[in-house]
Structures are given as C-alpha cells and as structure tokens.
Image (spheres, rainbow, N blue to C red):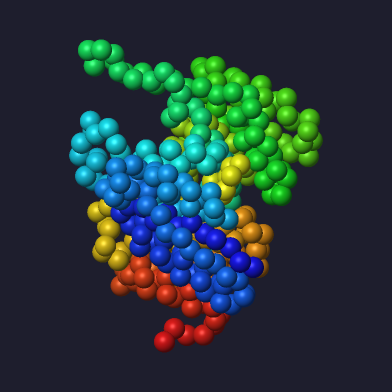
Amino acid sequence: MDANLAVLAGDGIGPEVTAQAVKVLQAVGARFDHNFSFHQAPIGGVAINACGNPYPESTHEICLKSDAVLFGAVGDLKYDSDPSAELRPEQGLLQMRKALSLYANVRPTFVFPSLIDRSPLQRARIEKADFIFVRELTGGIYFGEPRGRSENGSTAFDTAVYSKGEVERLARIGFELALKRRRKLTVVDKANVLATSRLWRETVQNMESEYPEVSVCYEFVDAVAMRLIQWPATYDVLITANLFGDILTDEASVITGSMGIMPSASLGDLVELFEPIHGSYPQAAGRDIANPLASILSAAMLLEMAFGLKTEALAVRQAVEKSLEAGVLTADLAVGKAPWGTAAVGDWVAREVHSPGVPLQ
C-alpha cells in the first residue's frame, strides 16, 4: 500500500514525539511492505513565526492532498504571556478542525496492566476500565457567535450553538462504535439547564430506534465527572459536546496514570487526523524527556481507522505494551528507575515493530 501522510508537528514537544511516531510508521512500512510518504507542514506558533498565520493555506493544501494527518501539538509560552495577542497558536488548531470538518474526536481510555499502579486511583476501580469518548469538535461554545467584550471591557460573552444535524452525525459515530463494543452509549449533557443539551437529548432519543441493540442512557456532565473517578469501568462509549468533552477527556486520562500514553483520532468529511491528547508542554521542549507513546499509539489508530490495517496497528500496540513491560519508560512513568529519553523509546518501539523479539543493539 502507498499512502501520503501530512505531518503537522507543531510546537513544544510536538516535533519530538511526532518524530517517534514517524519512525514507528516507517518500521511498519518496512515490515509489512507499505510505502508511507511524509509531508511536513507548519501549524501553531511555528507557523505564526514563519508566515503570520497559525494555519497557513499551504498547510491546508497539504492536508487535503494527504490520506491522513499526523498531528503533534500547538502552544507556546511566548503567546501565553500576552493574553491580548490577536494571533495565538491554538487558533491554528481550531481553524484546522473547522477547515477540514473534523467534527468528531475519538479518545479511548484504557489501562495497561504494567502501569496500573501508576494511576492515582485504586486498582479495583480502574483495572477493567475501557471506554471511548466521542467529543464534538467544531460546534458549541468554542465556535458559537456572537462572542466578544462590551465596549468598556467589563463584560465578556460566548455563545453555545448546536444544530440537530451536528448532533446526529456525532451520535451516529457513537452508536456505530458501541455496536462494535459492549453496546452501551452514554449521552453526557446538562439538559436540566441548557437548551443545547435538551436538543442533544431529543435528537439522540429520536435515533434510538435505528440502533435497538444499543442501550442508551443520559447523564448530566457533573455526575459523569464524579462517576469517571468512582466507577470508570461502567462506561463503554460516551458522546458529548465540545466544552464538556474537552474537560472530561483530560480527567479520564488520569485513570491511565499518564496523559503521555493516550492517543486520539479526529474524524470528518475530508481527511482524518490522529494526535496525542497531551498539549505542547513547552517547558520540556528539546530536553528529550517527553513521552512519545501517545503519539505512537495515535499512529496505530491511524493505521487501523484510516487504512483498515488492523494487523499492523496491533503490531504497534503490542510493541508499546512490551516496551512498558520491559521498563522502557520516560520520566513521567519511570518511578524509582532511570528514565529513557524520547528518542530512545521511539527507537525501542520501532525496532520491536520491525523485528519482534530481537534485542536492541
């Protein structure tokens, strides 16, 4: 198979972790006889610095011409220190999601047996946790109009807007995922307060008859925030609005013991994008300490979801699990042990993918 991949490494640790995912994909290509062509493009702060635009048209064109996108992270302390800056790296991410119609973010949460004691939660609560969040990405309060400040600057306002069509297309992804799993779907909302949430409930309720095999329940977002910590194993597939999903998926990452190992996919109408859920972590940039496994596991999702390469994706996931069992850990996970560097972890996993069981020389 031949495939073109856009690589948008972005800011902070993005280039370092993305480089390891590329390394692993090259190992997949060598072992399974695939040819991946990688096309680098700027986004975020590096793009602002280069051309004054956090999501340049040239980057957009590369994405459109690609079969999938591998994304790193955006965010730069330089822009964080100036809240009045008109251009910010994060705008590039939002622009890209809108331009590529990446309306559904799929974030799995699962526990590696070798890392279960790294979680701050009790083993008994999390050992069977295995669920997926489907977060709406291009609507809601992050994109709603009007927004702004009053003339005297003392009042600010944002608008949350959703249409029935936006909810339907996201819910359909949730239903289809549930059919392939334990057939349980949870709709996360705040329907006792918000009109948009009531639209979400009504829309999904009207779709239930299309998926009679799926059991659907509706829970308020504050209750889910609590139950994710108390009983995470009770959830299967959860769908929710943009803001709620942004918050809850970061909370869910705590279950695993490190945000540095959780991948994600963003699905849409034009091209699919795959990225680690962590941010740019600019304080760690260039220090070879960032955990690349979330980016590598995102590459595994890319293989399976974009190209249907299930065997290849499994090979990557198995290599990651073996690396964890072997103690090949970056500083975020290497409690009481000498940590491995970002590039060294990437080398180990790539070697294991290419030649399983052969010691790294």
Looking at the image, residue 339 lies above or below residue 232: below
Query: Residue 310's image quarter?
Result: bottom right
Looking at the image, residue 241 lies above or below residue 148: below
Question: For the N terminus, which image quadrant?
Answer: bottom right
Q: Is residue 46 left or right of residue 261?
A: left
Q: Nearer the viewer, residue 13 or 181?
A: 13
* Residue 204 visible to an observer of this rendering: yes
Tell me which residue sits at (61%, 20%) in the image.
199
Tell me which residue sits at (48%, 52%) in the image.
62
* Residue 226 visible to an observer of this rendering: no
Looking at the image, residue 240 lies above or below residue 278: above
Q: Is residue 165 left or right of residue 189?
A: right
Tell me which residue sits at (48%, 63%) in the image.
38
Question: For the C terminus, which image quadrant?
Answer: bottom left
On the image, the x and y values in percent for residue 105 come to 54, 43
Tell me which residue sits at (39%, 61%) in the image.
17
Q: Nearer the viewer, residue 26 or 242?
A: 26
Q: Nearer the viewer, residue 270 or 303?
A: 270
On the image, the x and y values in percent for residue 223 come to 51, 30
Q: Nearer the viewer, residue 302 or 184?
A: 302
Looking at the image, residue 274 lies above or below residue 144: below
On the image, the x and y values in percent for residue 27 come to 52, 74
